[in-house]
Amino acid sequence: MTSPFAESTVVVDGLAVRLLQAGEGEPVILLHGGSPGRALWCSSSDLWGPFAESLAASHRVIMIDLPGAGGTRARGLDDLTFAGAAHAVLGVAHELGLEAAHLVGHDDGGLLAIVLARTGEYPFRARSVSLLNATEAAPTGDMPSDVVLLNPPSGAGSPQLWALERMSFSTRHLDGLAPVLEDLTSSAAHTSAVEIVAQPGAAGRLRSDLLFTKGQMFAWARDHGYDVPIQLIWGADDPLSEGIFAVETMNFLATTSAELSLSFVHRAGHLAFREKPDEVAGHVTRFIQRFADRFAAVPA
Protein backbone atom coordinates (compact mmCIF):
# COMPACT_ATOMS: atom_id res chain seq x y z
CA MET A 1 0.00 0.00 0.00
CA THR A 2 1.37 3.41 -0.97
CA SER A 3 2.11 5.74 1.95
CA PRO A 4 0.09 8.99 1.93
CA PHE A 5 3.16 10.84 3.20
CA ALA A 6 6.03 12.33 1.27
CA GLU A 7 9.05 11.53 3.45
CA SER A 8 12.70 12.40 3.01
CA THR A 9 15.87 12.82 5.04
CA VAL A 10 18.39 15.59 4.48
CA VAL A 11 21.62 16.64 6.19
CA VAL A 12 22.05 20.33 7.00
CA ASP A 13 25.49 21.33 8.32
CA GLY A 14 25.87 17.92 9.91
CA LEU A 15 22.34 17.77 11.33
CA ALA A 16 20.04 14.93 10.32
CA VAL A 17 16.59 16.28 9.40
CA ARG A 18 13.51 14.24 8.52
CA LEU A 19 10.73 15.84 6.47
CA LEU A 20 7.22 14.42 6.50
CA GLN A 21 4.29 15.87 4.61
CA ALA A 22 0.84 14.99 3.32
CA GLY A 23 -1.07 18.24 3.90
CA GLU A 24 -0.24 21.75 2.73
CA GLY A 25 -0.47 23.55 6.06
CA GLU A 26 2.22 25.73 7.60
CA PRO A 27 5.50 24.12 8.65
CA VAL A 28 5.85 22.61 12.12
CA ILE A 29 9.30 21.99 13.64
CA LEU A 30 9.48 19.19 16.24
CA LEU A 31 12.17 19.55 18.92
CA HIS A 32 12.79 16.35 20.89
CA GLY A 33 13.87 16.11 24.52
CA GLY A 34 16.56 14.07 26.25
CA SER A 35 19.84 15.77 27.19
CA PRO A 36 22.54 14.00 25.14
CA GLY A 37 25.21 12.50 27.37
CA ARG A 38 23.36 13.51 30.55
CA ALA A 39 19.84 12.09 30.42
CA LEU A 40 19.42 8.39 31.11
CA TRP A 41 17.17 8.08 28.07
CA CYS A 42 18.04 8.86 24.47
CA SER A 43 15.77 10.68 22.10
CA SER A 44 15.72 11.63 18.44
CA SER A 45 13.25 12.12 15.62
CA ASP A 46 12.65 8.33 15.78
CA LEU A 47 10.55 8.74 18.93
CA TRP A 48 7.93 11.06 17.39
CA GLY A 49 6.29 8.12 15.60
CA PRO A 50 2.51 8.25 14.93
CA PHE A 51 2.29 11.73 16.50
CA ALA A 52 4.38 13.18 13.65
CA GLU A 53 2.30 11.31 11.08
CA SER A 54 -0.90 12.70 12.56
CA LEU A 55 0.48 16.26 12.31
CA ALA A 56 1.76 15.62 8.79
CA ALA A 57 -1.76 14.90 7.57
CA SER A 58 -2.29 18.67 7.53
CA HIS A 59 1.19 20.21 7.87
CA ARG A 60 4.76 20.01 6.68
CA VAL A 61 6.57 18.41 9.61
CA ILE A 62 10.28 18.98 10.16
CA MET A 63 11.99 16.68 12.68
CA ILE A 64 15.53 17.66 13.66
CA ASP A 65 18.01 15.35 15.36
CA LEU A 66 19.64 17.87 17.69
CA PRO A 67 23.41 17.66 18.31
CA GLY A 68 24.35 14.47 20.15
CA ALA A 69 21.15 12.64 19.18
CA GLY A 70 20.00 10.34 16.40
CA GLY A 71 22.04 11.01 13.29
CA THR A 72 23.69 14.25 14.45
CA ARG A 73 27.10 14.17 16.12
CA ALA A 74 28.10 16.82 18.65
CA ARG A 75 31.33 18.54 17.66
CA GLY A 76 32.01 20.00 21.09
CA LEU A 77 30.48 21.11 24.36
CA ASP A 78 29.00 24.26 22.83
CA ASP A 79 26.83 22.10 20.57
CA LEU A 80 25.15 20.59 23.66
CA THR A 81 24.14 23.94 25.16
CA PHE A 82 20.74 25.51 24.52
CA ALA A 83 22.41 28.28 22.54
CA GLY A 84 24.15 25.65 20.43
CA ALA A 85 20.87 23.81 19.83
CA ALA A 86 19.12 27.07 18.93
CA HIS A 87 21.89 27.87 16.43
CA ALA A 88 21.40 24.42 14.89
CA VAL A 89 17.64 24.89 14.51
CA LEU A 90 18.10 28.33 12.96
CA GLY A 91 20.57 26.87 10.48
CA VAL A 92 18.04 24.25 9.40
CA ALA A 93 15.28 26.85 9.07
CA HIS A 94 17.54 29.04 6.92
CA GLU A 95 18.57 26.13 4.71
CA LEU A 96 14.93 25.14 4.18
CA GLY A 97 13.93 28.72 3.40
CA LEU A 98 11.72 29.11 6.48
CA GLU A 99 11.31 32.58 7.92
CA ALA A 100 8.75 31.27 10.43
CA ALA A 101 7.26 28.02 11.67
CA HIS A 102 5.21 26.55 14.49
CA LEU A 103 7.37 24.98 17.19
CA VAL A 104 6.56 21.84 19.17
CA GLY A 105 8.99 20.89 21.93
CA HIS A 106 9.08 17.97 24.34
CA ASP A 107 10.97 18.07 27.66
CA ASP A 108 14.27 19.95 26.98
CA GLY A 109 12.91 20.69 23.52
CA GLY A 110 10.14 22.72 25.13
CA LEU A 111 12.65 25.04 26.78
CA LEU A 112 14.48 25.29 23.46
CA ALA A 113 11.21 26.28 21.74
CA ILE A 114 10.71 29.07 24.28
CA VAL A 115 14.26 30.27 23.64
CA LEU A 116 13.45 30.52 19.93
CA ALA A 117 10.18 32.34 20.62
CA ARG A 118 11.81 35.55 21.87
CA THR A 119 10.78 38.08 19.27
CA GLY A 120 13.65 40.12 17.87
CA GLU A 121 16.33 37.79 19.20
CA TYR A 122 16.63 35.73 16.01
CA PRO A 123 16.03 36.13 12.24
CA PHE A 124 13.18 33.66 12.62
CA ARG A 125 9.60 33.93 13.84
CA ALA A 126 7.84 31.33 15.95
CA ARG A 127 4.17 31.40 14.87
CA SER A 128 3.09 29.37 17.88
CA VAL A 129 4.70 27.24 20.56
CA SER A 130 3.38 23.95 21.92
CA LEU A 131 5.15 22.63 25.02
CA LEU A 132 4.73 18.88 25.58
CA ASN A 133 5.54 17.89 29.16
CA ALA A 134 8.25 20.55 29.09
CA THR A 135 9.84 19.54 32.39
CA GLU A 136 12.98 21.61 31.88
CA ALA A 137 10.91 24.75 31.26
CA ALA A 138 9.12 24.29 34.59
CA PRO A 139 10.28 26.21 37.69
CA THR A 140 13.28 24.57 39.30
CA GLY A 141 12.60 22.81 42.58
CA ASP A 142 12.49 19.41 44.20
CA MET A 143 11.56 17.22 41.27
CA PRO A 144 10.22 13.66 41.56
CA SER A 145 12.50 12.61 38.68
CA ASP A 146 15.35 12.13 41.16
CA VAL A 147 13.39 9.18 42.53
CA VAL A 148 11.68 7.97 39.38
CA LEU A 149 14.92 7.36 37.50
CA LEU A 150 17.02 6.35 40.50
CA ASN A 151 19.10 3.15 40.40
CA PRO A 152 18.84 2.12 36.73
CA PRO A 153 19.42 -1.57 36.03
CA SER A 154 22.83 -2.91 35.10
CA GLY A 155 23.73 -5.94 33.07
CA ALA A 156 21.00 -7.54 30.97
CA GLY A 157 18.21 -5.38 29.65
CA SER A 158 18.10 -1.88 28.26
CA PRO A 159 18.46 1.04 30.71
CA GLN A 160 16.92 3.16 27.95
CA LEU A 161 13.80 1.03 27.78
CA TRP A 162 13.64 0.87 31.58
CA ALA A 163 13.72 4.67 31.76
CA LEU A 164 10.92 5.09 29.22
CA GLU A 165 8.83 2.49 31.06
CA ARG A 166 9.26 4.42 34.30
CA MET A 167 8.20 7.67 32.63
CA SER A 168 5.07 6.21 31.03
CA PHE A 169 1.55 5.62 32.31
CA SER A 170 1.09 2.71 29.90
CA THR A 171 3.97 0.88 28.24
CA ARG A 172 2.08 -0.33 25.15
CA HIS A 173 3.67 2.43 23.07
CA LEU A 174 7.09 0.87 23.73
CA ASP A 175 6.33 -2.36 21.87
CA GLY A 176 9.03 -2.91 19.29
CA LEU A 177 11.04 0.13 20.40
CA ALA A 178 13.92 -1.78 22.02
CA PRO A 179 15.93 -2.17 18.77
CA VAL A 180 15.53 1.55 18.04
CA LEU A 181 16.83 2.45 21.49
CA GLU A 182 19.77 0.11 21.10
CA ASP A 183 20.66 1.80 17.82
CA LEU A 184 20.40 5.23 19.43
CA THR A 185 22.67 4.34 22.36
CA SER A 186 25.30 2.78 20.09
CA SER A 187 25.20 5.57 17.50
CA ALA A 188 28.16 7.82 16.81
CA ALA A 189 26.03 10.80 17.83
CA HIS A 190 25.27 9.47 21.31
CA THR A 191 28.84 8.27 21.78
CA SER A 192 30.16 11.71 20.88
CA ALA A 193 27.89 13.34 23.47
CA VAL A 194 28.87 10.89 26.21
CA GLU A 195 32.56 11.50 25.54
CA ILE A 196 32.11 15.27 25.61
CA VAL A 197 30.10 15.28 28.85
CA ALA A 198 32.68 13.01 30.50
CA GLN A 199 35.36 15.70 30.13
CA PRO A 200 36.30 17.52 33.36
CA GLY A 201 33.85 20.30 34.19
CA ALA A 202 31.58 19.60 31.22
CA ALA A 203 28.59 18.26 33.18
CA GLY A 204 28.72 21.21 35.56
CA ARG A 205 28.81 23.68 32.71
CA LEU A 206 25.77 22.07 31.09
CA ARG A 207 23.89 22.17 34.39
CA SER A 208 24.72 25.86 34.70
CA ASP A 209 23.62 26.39 31.11
CA LEU A 210 20.24 24.83 31.90
CA LEU A 211 19.72 27.07 34.94
CA PHE A 212 20.90 30.14 33.00
CA THR A 213 18.52 29.39 30.13
CA LYS A 214 15.59 28.87 32.51
CA GLY A 215 16.46 32.17 34.18
CA GLN A 216 16.45 33.92 30.81
CA MET A 217 13.03 32.44 30.04
CA PHE A 218 11.50 33.73 33.26
CA ALA A 219 13.25 37.12 32.99
CA TRP A 220 11.95 37.60 29.44
CA ALA A 221 8.43 36.70 30.55
CA ARG A 222 8.69 39.22 33.40
CA ASP A 223 10.43 42.08 31.58
CA HIS A 224 9.05 41.78 28.05
CA GLY A 225 6.35 39.15 27.83
CA TYR A 226 6.11 36.71 24.94
CA ASP A 227 3.93 37.77 22.02
CA VAL A 228 3.51 34.34 20.46
CA PRO A 229 0.60 31.96 21.23
CA ILE A 230 1.79 29.33 23.70
CA GLN A 231 0.05 26.15 24.80
CA LEU A 232 1.16 23.62 27.38
CA ILE A 233 0.11 20.00 26.87
CA TRP A 234 0.84 17.81 29.87
CA GLY A 235 0.43 14.12 30.54
CA ALA A 236 -1.66 14.18 33.71
CA ASP A 237 0.17 11.13 35.06
CA ASP A 238 3.71 12.27 34.35
CA PRO A 239 5.91 10.93 37.19
CA LEU A 240 8.72 13.32 36.25
CA SER A 241 6.68 16.50 36.45
CA GLU A 242 3.34 16.56 38.21
CA GLY A 243 0.50 18.78 37.05
CA ILE A 244 1.38 21.51 39.54
CA PHE A 245 4.58 22.16 37.59
CA ALA A 246 2.53 22.71 34.44
CA VAL A 247 0.35 25.20 36.30
CA GLU A 248 3.37 27.05 37.71
CA THR A 249 4.98 27.18 34.25
CA MET A 250 1.77 28.67 32.88
CA ASN A 251 1.75 31.25 35.68
CA PHE A 252 5.30 32.32 34.78
CA LEU A 253 4.30 32.71 31.13
CA ALA A 254 1.12 34.62 31.93
CA THR A 255 2.63 37.94 30.84
CA THR A 256 2.39 36.87 27.21
CA SER A 257 0.30 39.23 25.11
CA ALA A 258 -0.90 36.34 22.94
CA GLU A 259 -3.06 33.38 23.83
CA LEU A 260 -1.89 31.02 26.57
CA SER A 261 -3.54 27.70 27.34
CA LEU A 262 -3.01 24.49 29.29
CA SER A 263 -4.45 21.06 28.44
CA PHE A 264 -4.00 17.84 30.40
CA VAL A 265 -3.94 14.46 28.68
CA HIS A 266 -5.35 11.92 31.10
CA ARG A 267 -3.93 8.41 31.52
CA ALA A 268 -0.66 9.51 29.92
CA GLY A 269 2.79 10.08 31.35
CA HIS A 270 5.89 12.00 30.29
CA LEU A 271 5.62 10.74 26.71
CA ALA A 272 1.97 11.65 26.19
CA PHE A 273 2.67 12.28 22.50
CA ARG A 274 3.48 8.57 22.18
CA GLU A 275 0.83 7.20 24.52
CA LYS A 276 -1.96 9.36 23.07
CA PRO A 277 -0.54 10.51 19.69
CA ASP A 278 -3.82 11.46 18.01
CA GLU A 279 -5.15 13.31 21.05
CA VAL A 280 -1.96 15.33 21.49
CA ALA A 281 -1.72 16.00 17.74
CA GLY A 282 -5.33 17.18 17.84
CA HIS A 283 -4.48 19.73 20.53
CA VAL A 284 -1.56 21.00 18.43
CA THR A 285 -3.41 21.22 15.11
CA ARG A 286 -6.46 22.96 16.60
CA PHE A 287 -4.19 25.47 18.32
CA ILE A 288 -2.37 26.20 15.06
CA GLN A 289 -5.58 26.49 13.06
CA ARG A 290 -7.02 28.92 15.58
CA PHE A 291 -4.47 31.53 14.46
CA ALA A 292 -4.23 30.59 10.78
CA ASP A 293 -6.04 33.72 9.61
CA ARG A 294 -3.43 35.93 11.32
CA PHE A 295 -0.51 34.62 9.33
CA ALA A 296 0.47 34.79 5.69
CA ALA A 297 1.59 31.56 4.03
CA VAL A 298 5.20 30.60 4.69
CA PRO A 299 7.36 29.70 1.65
CA ALA A 300 7.99 25.96 1.38
Image: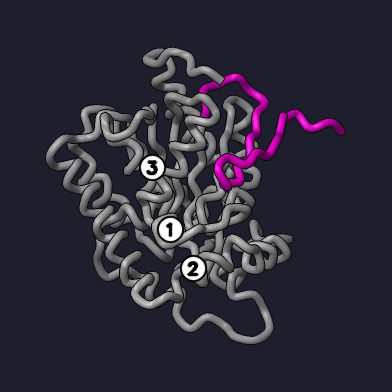
Q: Which residue is mark 2?
A: 37
Label 1 is placed on what type of residue?
Answer: Leu
Q: Say which residue appears at 45% left-offset and 28% top-offset.
A: 101
Q: CA distance from mark 1 to mark 2?
A: 9 Å
Q: Say which residue appears at 68% left-offset and 39% top-offset.
A: 9
Mark whose residue sits in front, 2 or 3: 2
Q: Residues within 10 Å of mark 1 (few under 14, many from 20)?
A: many
Q: Are marks 1 and 2 in contact (CB under 8 Å)?
A: yes
Q: Is residue 11 magenta?
A: yes
Label 2 is placed on what type of residue?
Answer: Gly
Q: Residues within 10 Å of mark 3 (few under 14, many from 20)?
A: many
Q: Say which residue appears at 58% left-offset and 53% top-offset.
A: 72
Q: CA distance from mark 1 to mark 3?
A: 15 Å
Q: Quadrant of residue 153?
A: bottom right
Lower position in the chain sequence, tag 2 or tag 3: 2
Residue 239, given in percent of the width and then of the height, sits at: 42, 65
Residue 287 sits above or below residue 202 on the image: above
